[in-house]
């Protein structure tokens, strides 16, 4: 069943989102047209009755050191952020994620205080696994890494989420990504739980044999907690088709059950439609521009990053008539003043498909390319910016540079790529912002649709998600704030299901 296009509904109906689903991988369905059912809850009005509101406001949100109550939604959000800081003061990325999302949810707590108590429950993951991964390198030396899998929330269905390999991966990063995935997975409209994992293993400076041995050691421990209908692993930073293949190969040596209902676990080690994450970002960018009565055609697009997602994004941007002008990695960035063509993109692909290779090698094959000129990639004039690199890679300073150079929008292609302060700066300077919680849903949309999903199907679902985020933002007096709209819509679906589950 297709998701209702909320923008075409009457005013009352446009405020209704699906709050409960019935079968796995079923799209959002509109609620009944009963007048007292609406966006906030199935049983009460948008503005809860004074009696019920008073009951929940009189209940203490926390009781650790005396009863702590709240009077306003923003006060509730601040209390929740304070609790996150108290529990995990060293996890900066997680605290940033909680802070930005809880402030988005404050209007919900104002209208229905009960949801603040659900948010408190949602902040704590259901299960957090950390384990030792021992493997042998090419010289025969035993190497050790930390492995993680955070199964954050299964209210909507079995866990699903990315794996990330890299030296930046730690418990705080995993927790931040896991918390954000709760809202983005819910936003897809499919029954997807939220999980994320990975390791501090760096695959870019290892041989192919070392990567294989590490993946086998990692899956040996992880196989106890994942599998069909339990937890589905997807590609992430540092984890591509090869790594997924190695992981599946080891899993099937350990467990005989490798599929459920005809759906293979880990896609039998051969992910279908691996371009979906990058294509999804491009489709969101096009949808956002169309909403501004514009298109991507002719737009100069600054891409920060050069991973598989960034390159698939560039491929789809070219199809839309846009002009990708940069790629970057830890070694620096390459800048093509006249843009990358399809043939030049193939050269970049050839370079980056060689494990550990850096984009700087590209200048050997191009007479027009510049390497690390100017000194900062954000000094390059562009129309749109796509940060697909590390977390917080776009700072306030970078955001101001983009605005000063005439950039009209920033579309995230990486998790938490835009720093919290930079996000506020973009809003202040009037730049369009496409948040990661919305733009990085491509892979999960495709998994929900099944193996027959096409790029056209993905494009249709992207438009639906955009309309949901846009309409929800308008409903909660945050017109144009897609970050708020996406997180509120995602939260409401999960929260209403959690209410029916009780204290679990």
Image (cartoon, rainbow, N blue to C red):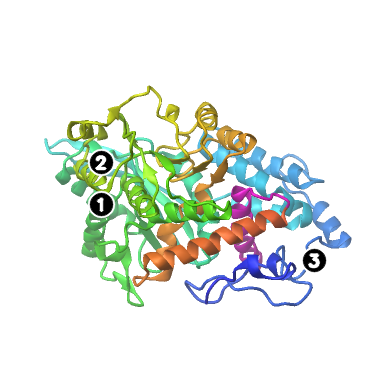
Q: Which residue is mark 1?
A: 243
Q: Which residue is mark 3?
A: 45
Residue situated furthest top in the rendering: 375
Distance between mark 1 and mark 3 Cα atoms = 49 Å
Tell me the residue at 23%/47% (across/down): 343
Q: Where residue 321 appears, x then y in whole percent?
A: 39, 51
Q: Where residue 501 appears, x then y in whole percent?
A: 62, 67
Q: Where residue 272 appears, x then y in whole percent?
A: 30, 64
Q: Is residue 106 above or below residue 245?
A: above
Which range of residues does the magenta coloring cover?
Answer: 477-500
Q: Where residue 345 appears, x then y in whole percent?
A: 26, 45
Of 427 and 337, nearer the camera is 337
Distance between mark 3 and mark 2 Cα atoms = 52 Å
Left or right: 421 in relation to 358 = right
Instruction: Categorize mark 3 by other alpha carbons within 10 Å: few (<14), some (14-19), many (20+).
Output: some
Q: Is residue 10 above or below residue 420?
A: below
């Amino acid at each position: 069943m297709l998701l209702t296009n909320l923008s075409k509904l009457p005013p009352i109906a446009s405020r209704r989102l699906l709050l409960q689903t019935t079968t796995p991988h079923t799209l959002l369905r509109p609620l009944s047209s009963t007048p007292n059912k609406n966006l906030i809850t199935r049983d009460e009005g948008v503005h809860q009755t004074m009696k019920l509101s008073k009951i929940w406001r009189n209940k203490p949100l926390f009781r650790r050191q005396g009863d702590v109550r709240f009077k306003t939604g923003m006060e509730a959000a601040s209390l929740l952020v304070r609790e996150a800081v108290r529990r995990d003061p060293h996890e900066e990325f997680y605290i940033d994620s909680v802070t930005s999302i809880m402030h988005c949810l404050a209007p919900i707590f104002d209208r229905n205080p009960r949801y603040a108590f659900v948010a408190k429950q949602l902040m704590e993951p259901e299960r957090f696994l950390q384990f030792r991964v021992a493997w042998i390198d090419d010289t025969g030396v035993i190497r050790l890494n930390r492995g993680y899998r955070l199964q954050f929330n299964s209210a909507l269905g079995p866990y699903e989420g990315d794996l990330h390999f890299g030296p930046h991966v730690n418990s705080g990063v995993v927790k931040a990504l896991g918390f954000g995935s709760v809202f983005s997975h819910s936003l897809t409209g499919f029954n997807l739980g939220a999980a994320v994992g990975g390791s501090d293993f760096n695959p870019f400076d290892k041989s192919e044999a070392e990567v294989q041995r590490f993946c086998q050691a990692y899956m040996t421990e992880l196989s106890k907690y994942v599998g069909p209908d339990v937890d589905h692993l997807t590609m992430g930073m540092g984890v591509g088709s090869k790594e997924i293949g190695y992981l599946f190969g080891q899993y099937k040596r350990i467990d005989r059950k490798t599929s459920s209902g005809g759906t293979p676990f880990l896609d039998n080690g051969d992910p279908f439609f691996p371009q979906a994450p990058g294509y999804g970002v491009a489709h969101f960018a096009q949808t956002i521009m169309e909403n501004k009565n514009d298109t991507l055609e002719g737009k100069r697009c600054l891409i920060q990053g050069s991973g598989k997602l960034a390159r698939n994004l560039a491929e789809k941007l070219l199809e839309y008539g846009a002009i990708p002008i940069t790629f970057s990695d830890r070694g620096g960035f390459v800048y093509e003043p006249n843009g990358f063509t399809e043939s030049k993109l193939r050269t970049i692909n050839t370079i980056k498909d060689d494990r550990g290779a850096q984009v700087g090698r590209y200048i050997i094959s191009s007479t027009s390319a510049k390497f690390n000129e100017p000194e900062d990639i954000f000094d390059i004039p562009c129309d749109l910016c796509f940060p697909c690199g590390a977390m917080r890679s776009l700072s306030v300073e970078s955001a101001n540079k983009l605005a000063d150079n005439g950039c009209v929008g920033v579309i995230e292609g990486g998790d938490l790529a835009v720093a919290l302060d930079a996000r506020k700066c973009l809003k202040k300077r009037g730049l369009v912002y496409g948040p990661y919680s919305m733009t990085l849903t491509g892979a999960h949309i495709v998994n929900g649709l099944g193996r027959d999903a096409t790029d056209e199907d993905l494009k249709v679902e992207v438009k639906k998600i955009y309309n949901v985020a846009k309409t929800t933002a308008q409903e909660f007096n945050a017109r144009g704030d897609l970050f708020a709209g996406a997180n509120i819509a995602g939260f409401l679906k999960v929260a209403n299901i959690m209410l029916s589950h009780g204290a679990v």
